[in-house]
Each structure stands twice: as structure tokens, then as C-alpha cells.
Image (spheres, coloured by chain):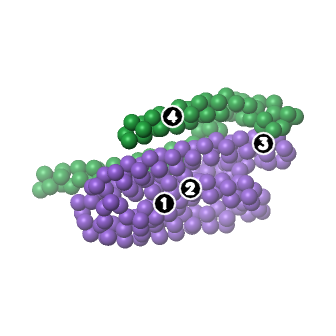
Chain colours: A purple, B green
């Protein structure tokens, strides 16, 4: 392992990309395709066209925010690639992205589903808790796999 | 090459700023004439700021964590040098 290599910028870029793309995965799969919940579906229940469109607007603001996170990730990745002292590893990048996605699931799951209760993964299920817990568990699993990939990439110690 | 990249970045940034400004002031639900006013009244009503805060809160936490990782090398080396000074 090369201790002189800086890895913060590459991992940070991967985290931003993972958070953004993980947010898009949530939005596209759960909000739009499966329609199991929306950002504020527990606060503004979807019962008619107006409430559906209100939730769609807030989903749009959410997608705008994760789009910005993805864009920041792209800029940081490009910036990291131009510096020779920064670790340049596909494993570390992939691990960071997966860890970012896991971090999104964990943080968003705890804050939005558990603490604030503004929506749940399966809004229309009789018991929402098992699905919320599965969502949190997926976050932990992604982070663990991502962390192991980051460590493996750091061990390789390559630069661009 | 650098000038070209700067020009492209400035152009993209300007376009993104214009798009965001239009979105901020735009009427939601352009596709539905009948429900447009009800949707706009609810989204941009008295709960707009609080709903926006609730929506942005987890992303703000994630942003802070990712930024902390960006500076982790500097924080780590500063912590190590302080530890060596104490020894």
C-alpha cells in the first residue's frame, strides 16, 4: 500500500456519484416505475390527481438535488484525474460509488423514513416497517462491499 | 484547450442557471389545465419552505459527509503531525 497517495478526492467523487445515482435509482424505480411512494406521500397522501401532481413536483425537486450531486461528482472525478498525487483506481472508484449509494439509502432511510416519517418505502403496505428495514439493510450491505473495494483499490496504489 | 474548456464550462453554467431560474418560478403541472392552480397553491403555499427543508435535509447531511471525505487526507495529516509534536 502506498501511504503517500491521496485518496480523499477520488473517494469523495465516487461518493457524490453514488449518492446522486443512488438517488436516481430510488426515484426512477420506486417513485416512477413501481410508484410505491413519493417524497412526501406520508405527509400529502396520494388520493387524487392533484395530490399525485403535488408529490410529482416535490419528486422533481428531489431529482434536481441528486442531479446536482451527480454533477459535482463528475467535476470532482475530472479534477482528481488531473492530479498525479491522487489515487487512480477503478476498484476504489467503484467501491466509493457503491458506498455512496449505500450511504444514501442509510441516511435518507433513517432521516426520511424513521425520524421525519415523510414517506416509507412501501407507502401502501399494511406494515411499512419491514420494507423500511430492508432498505436500511441494503444501505449497510452496499457500504460494506464498497468499503472492501476501496481498501482493495488503495492496496493496489496506482496513479493515473 | 484550457480556454475552450473554460468557455464550455461558462456556457454550461449559464444555461444551468437560466434553467434553474425558470424552474424556480415556473408553474407546476403545465400538462394539466384543470388541476394547475390547486397544485401551485399547495406546492408554493405556506408549507413550501418547511417541505423544502425536509426534502433537502438528508441530502445536506450526505453533502457534508462527502465533503469531509474530500478533505480527509489533510485532516489526517494534520492530526498525525499534531500527534508527533506532542510526542
Q: Mark 3 falls on what kind of element?
A: helix
Q: Say yes or no: labels 2 and 3 on the same chain.
A: yes
Q: Residue at x 27, y 59 (%)?
A: A5
Please, which chain is the residue tagged with disc 3 on? A
Mark 4 or 1, closer to the camera: 4
Per the image, the residue denoted by label 1 is: A97
Per the image, the residue denoted by label 2 is: A21
Work out whether residue B39 can be spotted: no
Please, which chain is the residue tagged with disc 1 on? A
Per the image, the residue denoted by label 4 is: B11
How dense is the environment of label 2, judged by Cα within 10 Å: few (below 14), some, or many (20 and up)? many
Which quadrant of the view contains residue A124?
bottom right
Q: Mark 4 falls on what kind of element?
A: helix
Give whichever of discs 1 and 2 has the lower sequence position. Answer: 2
For the residues labelled 2 and 3, the Cα–Cα distance comes to: 24 Å
For the residues labelled 2 and 4, the Cα–Cα distance comes to: 25 Å
Give whichever of discs 2 and 3 has the lower sequence position. Answer: 2
Q: Are marks 3 and 4 in contact (CB under 8 Å)?
A: no
Q: Is residue A95 left or right of residue A3?
A: right
For the residues labelled 1 and 2, the Cα–Cα distance comes to: 8 Å
Q: Are marks 3 and 1 in contact (CB under 8 Å)?
A: no
Mark 2 or 4, closer to the camera: 4
Work out whether residue A125 can be spotted: yes
Q: Is residue A9 left or right of residue A42?
A: left
Q: Is residue A22 left or right of residue A73?
A: right
Which quadrant of the view contains residue B33?
top right
Q: Are marks 4 and 1 in contact (CB under 8 Å)?
A: no
Per the image, the residue denoted by label 3 is: A53
Amino acid at each position: 500500500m502506498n501511504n503517500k497517495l491521496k485518496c480523499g478526492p477520488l473517494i469523495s467523487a465516487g461518493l457524490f456519484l453514488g449518492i446522486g445515482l443512488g438517488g436516481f435509482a430510488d426515484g426512477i424505480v420506486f417513485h416512477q416505475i413501481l410508484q410505491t411512494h413519493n417524497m412526501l406521500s406520508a405527509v400529502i397522501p396520494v388520493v387524487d390527481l392533484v395530490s399525485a401532481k403535488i408529490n410529482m413536483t416535490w419528486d422533481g425537486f428531489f431529482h434536481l438535488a441528486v442531479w446536482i450531486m451527480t454533477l459535482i461528482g463528475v467535476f470532482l472525478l475530472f479534477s482528481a484525474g488531473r492530479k498525479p498525487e491522487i489515487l487512480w483506481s477503478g476498484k476504489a472508484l467503484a467501491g466509493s460509488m457503491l458506498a455512496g449509494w449505500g450511504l444514501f439509502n442509510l441516511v435518507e432511510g433513517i432521516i426520511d423514513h424513521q425520524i421525519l416519517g415523510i414517506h416509507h418505502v412501501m407507502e401502501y403496505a399494511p406494515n411499512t416497517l419491514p420494507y423500511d428495514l430492508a432498505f436500511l439493510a441494503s444501505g449497510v450491505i452496499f457500504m460494506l462491499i464498497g468499503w472492501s473495494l476501496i481498501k482493495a483499490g488503495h492496496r493496489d496504489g496506482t496513479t493515473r | 484547450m484550457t480556454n475552450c474548456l473554460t468557455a464550455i464550462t461558462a456556457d454550461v453554467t449559464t444555461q444551468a442557471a437560466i434553467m434553474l431560474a425558470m424552474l424556480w418560478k415556473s408553474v407546476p403541472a403545465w400538462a394539466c389545465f384543470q388541476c394547475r392552480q390547486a397544485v401551485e397553491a399547495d406546492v408554493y403555499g405556506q408549507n413550501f419552505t418547511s417541505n423544502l427543508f425536509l426534502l433537502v435535509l438528508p441530502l445536506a447531511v450526505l453533502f457534508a459527509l462527502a465533503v469531509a471525505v474530500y478533505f480527509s487526507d489533510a485532516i489526517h495529516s494534520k492530526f498525525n503531525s499534531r500527534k508527533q509534536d506532542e510526542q
